[in-house]
Image (cartoon, grey):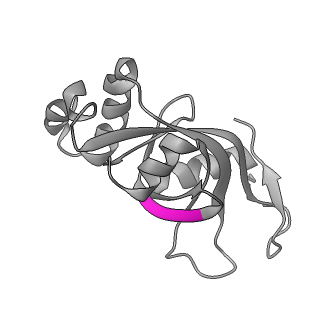
Amino acid sequence: MKKTSSQIAKKIISENLYLSLATLKDSVPWNTALFYAADENNNFFCVSTKNTIHVKNIELNPDVAFTIFNSTEKPGDINGVQASAKAYLVEPKEIIHAATTIYKKRFAKTPSDIKKYLSPDLYIGSAALRLIKIVPSKIFILDPTNKGSDDRVEVKF
C-alpha cells in the first residue's frame, strides 16, 4: 500500500533529529542546524542560546523556513520536509510544554533526566538558553507519485 504524503512527512519528522532553520535580518539570510521535537499539533520546538544569530533574527522577524531530511539517503531516494513558518521565543506559560516535548525526544532512554530541564528560569531573563517554537504555515515534500522529479506537494495534516 502506498503511503500518503502526510504519512511520508510524519515518518521523516519522527525519524530525524535535526532541522535546518533559515532566518533573515535586513535581507541577509542565516541558516543553522537545530535539534528539534514536534508536538501533537505539529509545532516544532528547539533549544538554543540567546546570543545566537538565529535567535536574534527570530526576535526581529518571525518569518522562517526549515527543512528536515535524512542526509544518509542515496541521491534519487531522498525525500524531505520543507516548510514556511513563523518562529517565536516560547512564552513563560508554554515553557513546561515546550521543554517536556523537546527533552522527551532528547532523553528518550533516560526520562528521569527530563525534570532538571523544566524550570522556566532556565529560559527567560538573564538565562543563557531560549526555547524556540516553530509554527508551520505550509509543509511540502517531494511528490511521491513522480519519483525522480523535483515537484513538491503540500502536506495537510
Above or below: residue 147 compared with residue 25: below
Q: Residue at x 69, y 35 (%)?
A: 157
Q: Residue at x 34, y 43 (%)?
A: 105
Quarter assignment of residue 97: top left
Q: Nearest the camera: 8 or 93?
A: 93
Q: Which residues are magenta?
A: 29-33
Query: Left or right of 144: which side holds 58?
Result: left
State the image coordinates of residue 72 (x, y, percent, origin top left).
49, 76
Q: Residue at x 59, y 81 (%)?
A: 74
Instruction: List the single residue furthest toward the top.
Output: 93
Q: Nearest the camera: 28 or 134?
A: 28
Above or below: residue 63 compared with residue 82: above
State the image coordinates of residue 22 (x, y, percent, origin top left).
57, 58
State the image coordinates of residue 68 (x, y, percent, origin top left).
56, 59
Q: Residue at x 75, y 45 (%)?
A: 155
Query: Left or right of 10: which side holds 145?
Result: right
Would residue 119 be visible to someone looking at this image? no
Tell whether position 36 is magenta. no
Quarter assignment of residue 107: top left
State the image coordinates of residue 11 (x, y, percent, origin top left).
57, 51
